[in-house]
Image (tube, helix red, strand yellow):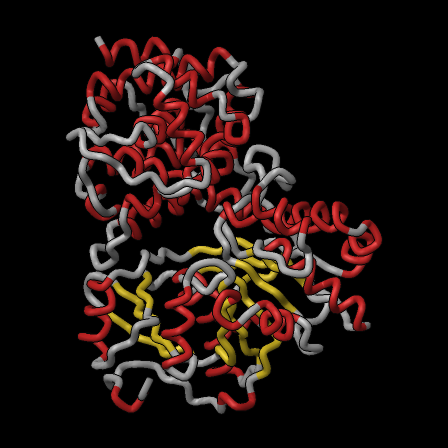
Amino acid sequence: MDTKLLSANAIVPQYNRNTLIPRMVHLGFGAFHRAHQAVYADILAQEHGSDWGYCEINLIGGEQQIADLKQQDNLYSVAEMSADAWQCRVVGVVKQALHAQVDGLDEIFRALTRPEVAIVSITITEKGYCHSPATGQLQLEHPLIIQDLADPLRPQSAVGVIVAALAKRRTAGLPAFSVMSCDNMPENGHVTRNVITAYAKALDPQLAAWIESQVTFPSTMVDRIVPAVTPGTLAQIAQQTGVQDSAAVACEPFRQWVIEDNFVAGRPAWEKAGAELVSDVLPFEEMKLRMLNGSHSFLAYLGYLAGYQHISDCMQDEHYVNAARHLMLAEQAPTLNTPGTNLEKYADSLLERYRNTALKHRTWQIAMDGTQKLPQRMLDSVRWHLAHSSDFACLALGIAGWMRYVGGKDEQRQPIDISDPLREEIAQRVANSAEGEPRVLALLQMTSVFGRDLPDNPRFVNAVTSAYLALLARGPKPRWLACWLVEPAFSGCGGLDQPMRVDLSARFQRIIC
């Protein structure tokens, strides 16, 4: 990329890229990492003289992303987009870009066993951990894990690659690195530790003991809305910057990163770029997962079924806005432990971000991989409400929306392209169940998603079944929500009063009738 051709308002690297050291290796060079973690590193290099650089690696898929980056001297642009302003930054902190199937595993391991590597970070989406979302434990029967345990020197999964790299470092007498998850999961560091150590124990108990004593797995909370890149996005960015950039990415101006300060071999001074370094990330993770990601999924399933292509389209419907706000404040907020945080203000700020018409964040994209997302975005909150005998009508409706979505047909009977690692199991359960209550009961038997407790809870089953039947009877456009949606009461300090306690089945039955 020739940065001299960029428009005058673009931020370009003013630092000497030759002085950067690839102390961080990142697995999963997707749009989110490009617009989030790499931007923090670029700000540190640009404004604070940091020499922390990245080696970027894709293991499965994304060959073109790596090829595009190499062709551009490892430079790419990030466009922060709002309805009334654009700002473009050219990120220059990438020192090397590799793909396992193009460059080979030997080259991947050479990168991971450099003595200077201090952090291996990952954005591989929830399904990349080869774990059960309901339990957080490694699935030893997962096809990739079975393959990697049979041939541990030529692994394919991120779990297998990280363990093999740590084994090589141990054999060579090199220090361990920290493994930092940046994916949307509660206690993502604990999940990463669980799957890494479980895999290592199945392979070599002594290696597992070394990993447990030498490696840290800091948890993080990441927040920035980054839609999937489309040809239209790239054309818009080229029009704004004056440069064709195949590796470019667009995002909202907002960004947040909360990091557990627990690193064995040092870290960048991320706090200088606006990150928060804390001892406990969990309250931040749960707040974001349940209020932002939970409402996103709620809008994605119902909005897609209603014919809305983008989240900003849903925000043009006041009924969706009211429903999403109710979900966040009446049903998600009471489950959180965030002292000092005004959750009403947080919810309103999320809705304002959703209204950003410059971002074409597709409902289909957010609806992907629902089996991996539902447990932390909705089901953990449902369990809280069941324990407290409180109202979870919107959560039940969101779960029912997922069930209608994975049925494979929208309201116009057009096919839906279901993208999910459990797609085959979902399709089988849909094909072998009649529409209505049998469909709900069949999908609830997916224990890797719902566990065994929820399908055995009559209140939960009745609530989801009633919501599903209401969707069948009235459709996904939630104008009928007004007959049962009750705004919560707020105290002056931003807290919430006790939510109303109602019979959800009776409520939905009234809607159907």
- The residue most toward the left is 412
Closer to us: 326 or 361: 361
- The total number of labels drawn is 0
Q: Quadrant of residue 337?
A: top right
Q: Looking at the picture, does residue 107 appear above or below residue 497?
A: below
| Residue farthest toward the right in the current orientation of the protein | 206
Can residue 115 be seen here?
yes
Residue 268 in view here: no
From the viewer's perspective, is 95 left or right of 403? right
Relative side of 360 to 73, left or right? left
Percent across and percent down for residue 178 are 67, 63
Q: Residue at x 57, y 63 (%)?
A: 121
Closest to the observer, 384 or 367: 367
Q: Is residue 46 above or below residue 200?
A: below
Identify the residue shown where x is 29% and y is 49%. Answer: 354
Locate the N terminus by quadrant: bottom left
Give the percent coordinates (x, y) of residue 110.
64, 74
Front in this rendered view, residue 366 or 385? 366
Whether 510 is drawn above or below 397: the answer is above
**Residue at the image point whose x is 28% and y is 44% from the top:** 363
In percent of width and height, residue 148 lies at 64, 51
- Residue 208 rendering spot, x and y as whole percentages: 78, 52
